[in-house]
Image (cartoon, rainbow, N blue to C red):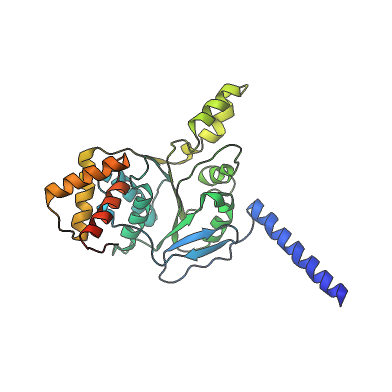
Amino acid sequence: MENIDQNSRIGAALERIAHALDTLAGTTRATARIEDGIDAYLWDGSDHVLVPVRNVNRVPLELLEGVSHLRDILLDNTLAFARGHGANNALLWGARGMGKSSMVKAIHAHIGGLADPDIGRLILIEIAREDIATLPGLLRFVVERPERFIIYCDDLSFDGDDASYKALKSVLDGGLEGRPANTLFYATSNRRHLMPRDMIDNERATAINPGEAIEEKVSLSDRFGLWLGFHNCDQDTYLAMVRNYVTHYGIEVDDDELRAKAIEWSATRGSRSGRVAIQFVRHLAGEKGKAIG
């Protein structure tokens, strides 16, 4: 009996080791499933499962003020993909709080609500930066599905000796398997080249061949067909954002009062952005006894 128990423990330990090695190699097959009526998921890279998100934190597409030209470009790209046409992976980079991640989620919801017979089921999967190395395992699951998938990573960047970017680079361009035809990859980042400037400068200064030393990491951003740059907004755009939110949520406030309080709020935060605007509107709603989402 003791030998049987010992053999069982050894067998279980070997199975865990094998699973860990498969995960590192990106060969574990996902045990995930897509549920009826749920079109947003979180990818759990450690267990290779999809976690359904029943209530997505997002805003209506029309509330994204000040970035309409970027919104239209990404919307057209996503619509083409949803209809089975050619489309590019996209990198949304730039200033914090200007609606990069909100835009991805809002466009997904907008397309999902269209009554267009040419548009198939479009599913949004968010993958954490820490799980990028398991991306090949996720792709091996979705490639066999009839739906179309946007795989989305928020705040993507790489530091130091982090080599997980190689898994993403292989998927975006090149590699034997490449990116499945039913997937797009969207990423947001504060960095245009997905790595800090001081790291680029350091590698350039210490390398025997400076160009080749940094080419592999910097070229990752080149694998995105779309680069959409988000920049800090001016005061008029910020106030338009505030007014848009106030109108949408039905908050009654005098124009002069709204302008003065909105400017004061942004001054205390030291910045103007869509994030600052919605934070102010939530504060104003509290003052006015109004509940908002």
Q: Image quadrant of residue 211?
A: top right
Q: Is residue 211 visible?
A: no
Q: Position of residue 254 (x, y in %)?
A: 12, 52
Q: Image quadrant of residue 30?
A: bottom right
For the N terminus, give its image quadrant: bottom right
Q: Position of residue 178 (x, y in %)?
A: 54, 48
Q: Determine the residue positioned at 63% across, 59% down.
A: 28
Q: Determine the residue positioned at 51% across, 29% down.
A: 198
Q: Determine the residue positioned at 58% across, 61% down.
A: 48
Q: Position of residue 79 (x, y in %)?
A: 34, 54
For the C terminus, give its image quadrant: bottom left
Is 215 located above or below residue 116 in the figure? above
Is 244 located above or below residue 211 in the figure? below
Q: Nearer the viewer, residue 271 or 201?
A: 271
Q: Nearer the viewer, residue 179 or 237?
A: 237
Q: Position of residue 241 (x, y in %)?
A: 23, 48
Is 96 located above or below residue 142 in the figure? above
Q: Determine the residue positioned at 30% across, 63% down.
A: 113
Q: Is residue 265 left or right of residue 229?
A: left
**Total numbered badges shown on the rendered structure:** 0
Q: Nearer the viewer, residue 142 or 204?
A: 204
Q: Is residue 286 visible?
A: yes
